[in-house]
Amino acid sequence: MPIKLPSSSPKRDLVRKLVDASVSAVPFAGGPLAAIYSLTHPPQSEIEEERWRQEITKLANDVEAAVNFILKRVSLSENAAYLGRWMSENAKTGWADIFDYDQIVAQFPEASKTEILEAVGELEIEGMLRISKVLGRPFSHVRAGSRLYEAFDPIVFGDVSPRRDAVTVAMAVLDADAMVSCAAIADQHGWSVRRINPALAIVGEMIADGRKSRPLGQPLGIRAMMADPQERVRLRRFVKEVNGAD
């Protein structure tokens, strides 16, 4: 028996949320559509990616057609999509949240172990989580990654996009000439730890360890960070990509 799904399709919900958020950003140069493309349809070449974007742009006035077009290319199964959404809903900090084997099995009592393992395996293949193995059971626990929050937070929280939040964080780093306090960024925008952490992870991937501070027991995944010249270029390009700027 498959993982019990809610009334609507989590996979369709994922695509619809991202497409709905992208319609106002024709020709879909960045933002939510860029997120779903990177998560579900890695380009084999820049030419292939550009062709894909052009096809989506032609469907801009028909959201349902755009949703159906993208769904054919989304690799996640319904089970994996539902599991990913559940993890996003139940994540406490938005930074490498841990879900153990017994917790996942208890949440999906109607699913077989094989179905659960394959759903977990799909999310790992997509880079959304890491599986920790242990003797005596299929796995010990899984640790959620930033790509999981990036994909499912827009569904769970509606108007929240980790990528767009990451633009705000990146701009704060770009506007500073010294270490930027991540707690100060959260306070300025009224963000919870759960909201800012996925954005910090996205930006943190573009900054070397020596220029970002460890949490030291604090709930924030990164306490402070700054960028060197090369990293500033990466951040600037990221901001332009998400904002759809030329």
Image (tube, grey):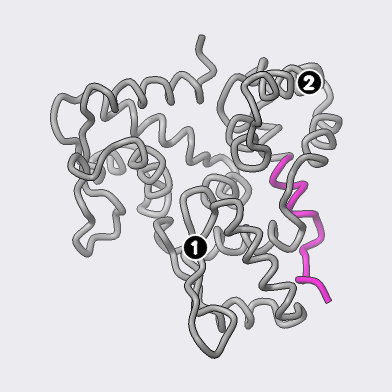
Q: Is residue 203 left or right of residue 5?
A: left
Q: Which residue appears at 63% of the width and 48% of the height? A: 155
- Taking the magenta stretch, the answer to whether it contains residue 116 is no
Q: Secondary structure at mark 1?
A: strand
Q: Residue at x 29, y 54 (%)?
A: 220
What residue is rendered at 54% in x and 78% in y?
Answer: 139
Q: Position of residue 78 (x, y in %)?
A: 77, 58
- Given residues 134 and 207, the one toward you in this image is 134
Please give left or right for residue 32 compared with residue 186 in the image. Answer: right
Looking at the image, which residue is at 78% across and 71% down?
Answer: 4
Quarter of the image with the N terminus in it: bottom right
Query: Which residue in the protein does label 2 denote?
Result: 55
- What distance separates the C-alpha of mark 2 from that of mark 1? 33 Å
Q: Name the amino acid, label 2.
A: Glu
For residue 130, the mark is 1
Which amino acid type is shown beneath numbered disc 1? Arg
* Stretch of the chain drawn in magenta: 1-15
Residue 245 drawn above or below residue 155: above
Q: Which mark is residue 27?
A: none
Is the magenta region chiefly helix, strand or loop?
loop
Instruction: Pinpoint residue 47: horizontal percent, then vertical percent.
Output: 67, 18
